[in-house]
Each structure stands twice: as C-alpha cells, then as structure tokens.
Image (tube, helix red, strand yellow):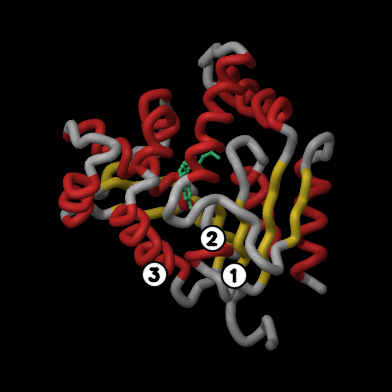
Amino acid sequence: MSLVDRPITIALDGPAGSGKSTVARAVAERLSLPHIDTGAMYRAVTLKALERGVGALDADGLQSLLDGTDIDLRDGKVFLDGRDVSAEVRGGPVTASVSQVATNGPVREWMVDRQRRLVGERGGVVEGRDIATVVLPQADFKFFLTAAPQERARRRAAELALEGVLVSLEDVLIGIEARDRLDAGREVSPLRVAEGATVIDSTGRSVDDVVDEIVAVTRG
Ligand code: CDP
C-alpha cells in the first residue's frame, strides 16, 4: 500500500489523561492530517442532553435527541448544531456525565457513523476509546497510549489549574478512575488494546518524545 495514493488514518486510543489529545494534535500537525477528537463529540451530545434534561442512561431519549443533532469538528473546535461549544464541553458537568452517555448503544452507533464520515477521504489522526477496535479497524496505524493513573491525574489537574479550576489531585484521580472503569467495563465497544496496536506508556516521557515515536512508526 502506498501512502502517497491516499491520506493515511492513524487510530489513537487510550484512557483519560494519557496525553492522547496533545499527542494527536501534534502528530496531525507534523503529518499535515486532520485531527479528529471523538471524545469532544461524546462531550457535545452530553452537553445537549444536560441542556434538554435527557437522562444519561435514557437510550431512547438520547436517540431521539441525536436524530435532530449536528455535531461537527472544524479548526480544532467542536460545533453542536452550529454553535461553538469547545469550552463548555470541557466543564465539570459534562465530564461527570459523558462516560455514562457513552455507554448507550444507539449513541455509539450514531457516533461511529458520523466519525467515519468525518474521516472520509481526507484521513486523519483519530483519537478516542474505540477507534482501532470499532470505528476504523482498517486504520493504517494503531496506537494505544497509556500512563500510570497517578501521572494521568497529575496531568489532568495541571490542565484544569491552567483553566483556573482548582481541584485536589485526589479528586481528579477518583474521577479518572471512575471513568476508566465505565469505559473499560461497558458492554458496547469497551476501551481495550486493539489487535496489532502499538502500546506506548508515556509515564515519565515528554510529549515530543512520544510524538517522535509515532511519527517514526508512520514513516516506516
Ligand atoms: O479528554 P479525556 O481523555 O478526559 O476524555 P475525552 O477523550 O474527551 O472523552 C470523554 C469520554 O467520552 C470518555 O471518558 C469516554 O467515556 C467517551 N468516549 C468514548 O466512549 N469513545 C470515544 N471514542 C471517545 C470518547
């Protein structure tokens, strides 16, 4: 297969705080590919559900909500029905509910379809939890990024502090571990290492170092 003939697809899965988003963005820039943050899409539908009072486990309610919904990713931003919700989707209420919303089969089906269309013919660096296993099992390259829970919590707490949100490390760790449990334990497309994926443990490693490793693999 020649990578010159068509744009490549790179699947990047991993748990919260593993550095996926930062790494995915940097790899996409280095390889001039679109960056597709599927977590932002689950966060967007969660925001809409919270706004409309639809329960996080109400599969039917969520399905009808999605029937009239448009979620798009452009220029590093996420749009919900045409509205830029990039900042709102990172907030506490959405973060607390998103993994429950993401357990619903109809929500996942809708997302997988939309995500495949977004990747379309342009390819991309696609990050999430089920990219290499479900969304793009034929991806050209598959990576599973992880890091020790304590380090993931430290990174997330530092990110939040930059946004002016002060949360104790312990609370962040509890939140991350709760989401890990839901993501890895759910029935539909649980978070797991796909066959053929390269596992990268980023504990104690810099972003540049991890990005270099991924870019080197894609260049063979
Ligand atoms: O940035 P962080 O890793 O904390 O989370 P995210 O990538 O924004 O994803 C938020 C949540 O959406 C995850 O905890 C999963 O529950 C869900 N998700 C998913 O189920 N499948 C994906 N492909 C992406 C996200």
* Quadrant occupied by the C terminus: bottom right
**Identity of the residue drawn at 65% across and 26% down:** 153
Q: Amino acid at mark 3?
A: Arg
> As shown in the figure, which amino acid type bears the numbered disc 1?
Thr
Q: Residues within 10 Å of mark 3 (few under 14, many from 20)?
A: few
Q: Element at badge 3? A: helix
- State the image quarter where residue 118 is shown: bottom left
Residue visible at 56% across and 71% down in the picture: 137
The answer to whether the residues at label 2 and label 1 have Cβ atoms under 8 Å apart is: no
Q: Which mark is residue 117?
A: 3
**Residue on which disc 2 sits:** 131
Query: Nearer the N terminus, badge 3 or badge 2?
Result: 3
Residue 72 rendering spot, x and y as whole percentages? 35, 55
Task: Say whether disc 2 or disc 1 marks the residue closer to the N-terminus.
Answer: 1
- Is 41 on the left-hand or right-hand side of 76? left
- Label 2 residue SS: helix
Would you say the residues marked 3 and 1 are in contact, meaning their CB atoms lie under 8 Å apart? Answer: no
Kindly state the secondary structure of the residue where label 1 is placed.
strand
Mark 3 and mark 1: span between their CA atoms? 13 Å
Disc 3 to disc 2, C-alpha distance: 13 Å
The circle on residue 81 is: none
Q: Is mark 2 within 8 Å of ligand 1?
A: yes
Decide if residue 141 is on the left or right side of residue 84.
right
Label 2 neighbour load within 10 Å: few <14, some 14-19, many 20+: many
Name which residue type carries label 2.
Answer: Ile
Instruction: In the rendered view, tell whether residue 44 sits above or below residue 122.
Output: above
